[in-house]
Image: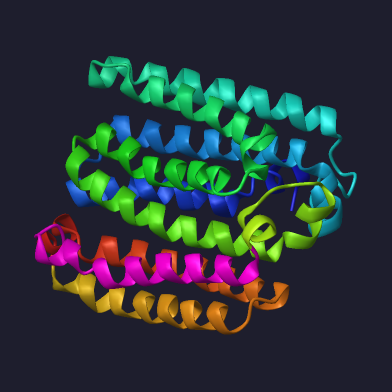
Amino acid sequence: MNAYLEILRPGNAVMAVIAILLMMLISGNFTLAPILAALVVFVVTGAGNVINDYFDYKIDAINKPKRPIPSGRISRKTAGIYSIALFAIGIIVAFSTKFLLDNFLLGIIALLSSLLMIYYAYSLKKKALIGNLSISFLTGLCFVFGGIAVGEIITSIYLGVYAFLMTMAREIVKDMEDVEGDKKEGATTFPIIYGMKKSSILAAALMIIASVTSPVLYFIGIFNILYLAVLFIAIILFLVGAVSILKDQSVENSAKVSKRIKIGMSIIFLAFAAGSPFLASLF
């Protein structure tokens, strides 16, 4: 893969875009505003990933040596310039939606989110829970961003809460996976401060809470019965992941559980789509 594309971590960026696409599908609003919102989310998320690699190049040299900066395929200076350019493009496009929505909300959110991403990469990431909360908040905010673009703000907040819970669980598990490199760089992540066992309990609790409460979205009428059918698969994955991380807090198992959570999140997004009223109306 081209290094300039790889450093964006397009898989993560596309996951963020899916939040916008899901809000389009749920609302049935396929206008230009949500399309531009999806573009903004992809570019700004990619910029956030680049600036994260810019600041984390020493840790990545230990934990992820094949990434573009530690492998030497992109210089650190070039990555910094690339990130700022992407942030600027995303913010400009977000403010341009004012002509479609008659407000600057998307532009303001894109600007503040970009600043938070930069501060997260520079400082917050190394602090116990605060960094995890920041990135989880930004993930949930993607749904709200899409909700504003399509005029479904209340529904987007509900979905954002679940995205927050799932991301928070994965963030804790990822910190468990990266604990050795983080220790060498003097980071104060939750596993380093409170230990792997307590970290596993927190991550498992978040997975269980998300699993047990997610059917509520069907019972309050946001989704139809197809949502529950697909959701069941994700719930099984989350509960298996919760049990696994409680039993084994090794770096190797943490990496496996992190992947399971990511797959589970993808399935939940599929459940959102399958249970959407608009999709049901087509059949």
Query: Residue at coordinates 18% horizontally, 42% vertically from top-left?
Result: 154
Residue 31 shows in this picture: no
59 and 45: which is toward the camera:
59
In the picture, residue 235 is in which quadrant? bottom left
Up the image or down, 188 lies above or below 39; here it is below
> What residue span does the magenta drawing correspond to?
195-223
Looking at the picture, the colour scheme in use is: rainbow
Is residue 207 covered in magenta? Answer: yes
Up the image or down, 277 lies above or below 245; here it is above
**Horizontal relation, residue 280 to residue 249: left or right:** left
167 and 224: which is toward the camera:
167
Query: Residue at coordinates 31% horizontally, 39% vertically from top-left?
Result: 144
**Horizontal relation, residue 64 to residue 203: left or right:** right
Where is residue 64 shown, x and y percent of the image? Answer: 79, 57
164 and 128: which is toward the camera:
128
Query: Residue at coordinates 86% horizontally, 47% vertically from top-left?
Result: 70
Q: Quadrant of the C terminus?
A: bottom left
Where is residue 237 shown, x and y percent of the image? Answer: 43, 79
| Residue that protrudes farthest toward the front in the picture | 194
Count of picture labels: 0
**Horizontal relation, residue 48 to residue 147: left or right:** right
Up the image or down, 235 lies above or below 77; here it is below
- Give the main secondary structure, helix, strand or loop, of the magenta stretch: helix
